[in-house]
Structures are given as C-alpha cells and as structure tokens.
Image (cartoon, grey):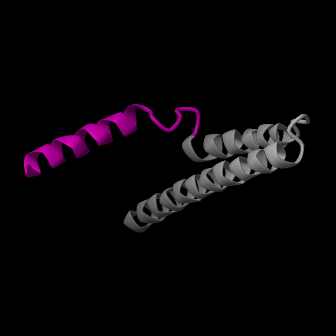
Amino acid sequence: MKDEAYERAKKKAHDIREFYNHLIIYIIVNAMLLIINLLTSPGAWWFYWVTIFWGIGIVWHAFSVFGEKGVFNKEWEDKKIKEIMENEKKK
C-alpha cells in the first residue's frame, strides 16, 4: 500500500513537471512565432492561430494534470502556508 502511494505521488510529480515543461515550450515558441510574424508579415497576423489551438491543448493538459480544482486550489494554499511558516521559523 505504501508503495502504491509512492508510485501515485511519483507519477503526479512527473505529470506536473511535464506540464510545466510543456507550458515553457509553449511560451518560448509562441514568442518566437510572434517575432517572426512581426518581422516577415506585420500586416497579416497568422501566429495567433498556433497560439489559440496550442493554447487549447495547454488547457486540456492542465485539466488532465490538476483536475477541475486547478493549480492554485485549497490544498496548494494550505501547503504554501505551511512552507511560509517553516521559512519564517528558520529566520
């Protein structure tokens, strides 16, 4: 049972890391596409099509990782409060 809990936690941590990697790549690539769009054809905004559809994929990925509660839910808030309190004790 303990091994199952560990494996679930390990998978969750991996899924979260992969989501943030996906998000970082999304931001970098879309920033580059914006720059390319501005330099090559400033009158025709084509980059936003990629941003929109890939953004839908990002939202889908976020729901699959974090669920309907979202990233900054009550559990996250409680964990952050404990973390801040522990950091304050160390000072």
Q: Which residues are magenta?
A: 67-91
Q: Nearer the viewer, residue 2 or 51?
A: 51
Q: Nearer the viewer, residue 26 or 58?
A: 26
Left or right: 81 as drawn, with respect to 71: left
- Tell me which residue sits at (45%, 35%) in the image: 72
- Tell me which residue sits at (13%, 44%) in the image: 88
- Tell me which residue sits at (67%, 46%) in the image: 61
Magenta stretch, main secondary structure, is helix
Q: Quadrant of residue 25?
A: bottom right
Left or right: 51 as drawn, with respect to 4: right
Residue 22 in the image, given as x and y percentages of width and height: 64, 55
Residue 28 in the image, given as x and y percentages of width and height: 66, 53
Q: Nearer the viewer, residue 34 or 66?
A: 34
The outermost residue toward the bottom is 3
89 falls in the magenta region: yes
Residue 57 in the image, given as x and y percentages of width and height: 75, 44
Q: Nearer the viewer, residue 24 or 42?
A: 42
Residue 3 in the image, given as x and y percentages of width and height: 42, 68
84 falls in the magenta region: yes
- Tell me which residue sits at (22%, 42%) in the image: 84
